[in-house]
């Protein structure tokens, strides 16, 4: 098939969940299909990005969004009914490029990751299209409202209402819809939401095959994009609510907070018990050096890659009910699930003091992920959705 794939971010480096998902989907789809990739970019381009993506796709187009254009888009967006993040990622230059590619290449299928990119192609009714909602973005925004300051709260309320409506409106413009978990599918505001196909994330085999380390530097690890509000919230929760309880029994407990772009709020968490690494070139090394991975997510949506990766490496994990609802692991078998500081502290203390229990959770967690979350399995499903749509159009 000739595929046109449109992304709101350049999928390299892989420091964010949407980039990781897009990158592995691209690698798989480009093996047997002619892929034209269009990416929007609002940051400084990584020097290796073009070379990496061109080694995968037939053609790669990166459209740079200027700061001026973004501000203008957002101002205009305030007087629109579209979500602000749809307005944010719109570019006339990108529209002209996409129109040109469609005219010249006549793609068999168009794939849009996130509703941010849908405005570019919703008018094309003769070409089969797939929208990857990925997450229920509206619910993710709604969960952030309560803890926002008064000004940001007003903006989030507006964005939530627009996203909630737009997720329903855009549904009918696409032949196929995919999403990362059943939990997220249930949050999409559409009567036919059950027709949305579940295409979860996977885990790379390099995590499953990474050598185990006996010498552990860190007792606890929390990882992710450290400028992402749900991750910031979780890191603060660990340090301020959970660690004080653990320290009563394990005074020298060591927590590593690892991930790109730590904000000043994250950096301020540093102490004798808390390390903040910033960007890590190989997150596998950090996982391998940790006894436990904790993901006490209270807001946000989607499937936590940090859990998939850690479990694949045989690291016992502790998760919130919210995060595990997407993962669907089994409490006290291949993961531990907690929802209060006291429960998290009890799980941490148990795993540190009971090596046999920790090893059992780790072994079963690794097996669970290897069976249920392979990238090839997930991406084959995505490709079949596209093939079926193309042949039946």
Image: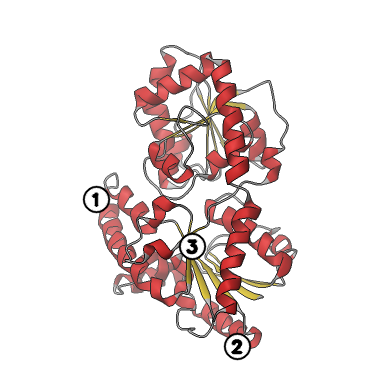
Few, some or many C-alpha atoms within 10 Å of disc 2 (few <14, some 14-19, many ≥20)?
few
Question: Mark 3–mark 2 contact, CB under 8 Å?
Answer: no
Q: Nearer the viewer, mark 2 or mark 1?
A: 2
Q: Which label is found at residue 103? A: 2
How far across and how far down the image is residue 86, in percent? Answer: 41, 69
Residue at (45% x, 46% y) in the render: 326
Few, some or many C-alpha atoms within 10 Å of disc 3 (few <14, some 14-19, many ≥20)?
many
How far across and how far down the image is residue 102, in percent? Answer: 59, 83
To which residue does mark 3 refer?
178
Of the residues under marks 2 and 1, which one precedes in the sequence?
2
How far across and how far down the image is residue 231, in percent? Answer: 44, 42
Question: Mark 3–mark 1 contact, CB under 8 Å?
Answer: no
- Give the Cα distance between marks 3 and 2: 26 Å
Residue at (58% x, 70% y) in the render: 386
Of the residues under marks 3 and 1, which one precedes in the sequence?
1
Of the residues under marks 3 and 2, which one precedes in the sequence?
2
Placement of 324 over or under 43, stated as above or below = above
- Left/right placement of residue 223 relative to residue 2 reads left
Residue at (48% x, 77% y) in the render: 120
Q: Which label is found at residue 150? A: 1
- Left/right placement of residue 170 relative to residue 117 reads left
Which structural element holds mark 2? helix
């Amino acid at each position: 098939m000739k595929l046109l794939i449109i992304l709101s971010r350049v999928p390299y480096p892989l420091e964010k969940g949407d980039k990781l998902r897009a990158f592995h989907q691209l690698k798989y789809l480009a093996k047997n299909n002619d892929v034209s990739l269009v990416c929007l970019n609002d940051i400084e381009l990584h020097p290796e990005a073009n070379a990496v993506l061109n080694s995968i796709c037939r053609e790669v187009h990166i459209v740079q969004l200027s700061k001026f254009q973004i501000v203008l888009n957002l101002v205009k967006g305030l007087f629109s009914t579209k979500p602000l993040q749809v307005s944010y990622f719109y570019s006339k230059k990108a529209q002209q490029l996409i129109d040109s590619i469609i005219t010249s290449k006549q793609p068999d299928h168009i794939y849009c990751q996130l509703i941010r990119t849908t405005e570019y192609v919703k008018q094309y009714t003769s070409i089969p299209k797939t929208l990857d909602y990925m997450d229920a973005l509206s619910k993710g925004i709604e969960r952030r409202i309560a803890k926002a300051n008064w000004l940001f709260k007003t903006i989030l309320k507006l964005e939530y209402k627009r996203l909630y409506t737009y997720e329903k409106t855009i549904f009918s413009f696409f032949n196929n819809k995919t999403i990362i978990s059943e939990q997220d599918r249930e949050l999409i505001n559409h009567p036919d939401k059950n027709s949305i196909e579940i295409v979860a994330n996977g885990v790379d085999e390099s995590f499953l095959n990474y050598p185990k380390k006996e010498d552990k530097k860190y007792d606890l690890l929390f990882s992710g994009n450290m400028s992402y509000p749900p991750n910031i919230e979780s890191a603060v929760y660990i340090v301020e609510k959970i660690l004080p309880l653990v320290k009563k029994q394990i005074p020298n407990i060591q927590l590593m907070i690892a991930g790109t772009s730590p904000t000043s709020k994250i950096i301020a968490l540093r102490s004798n018990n808390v390390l903040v690494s910033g960007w890590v070139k190989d997150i596998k090394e950090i996982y391998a050096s940790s006894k436990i991975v904790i993901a006490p997510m209270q807001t946000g949506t989607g499937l936590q890659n940090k859990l998939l990766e850690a479990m694949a490496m045989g690291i016992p994990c502790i998760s919130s009910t919210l995060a595990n609802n997407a993962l669907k692991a089994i409490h006290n078998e291949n993961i531990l699930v907690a929802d209060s500081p006291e429960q998290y502290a009890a799980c941490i203390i148990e795993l540190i003091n009971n090596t046999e229990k920790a090893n059992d959770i780790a072994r079963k967690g690794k097996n669970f992920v290897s069976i249920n979350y392979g990238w090839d399995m997930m991406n084959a499903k995505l490709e079949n959705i596209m093939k079926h749509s193309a042949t039946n159009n």
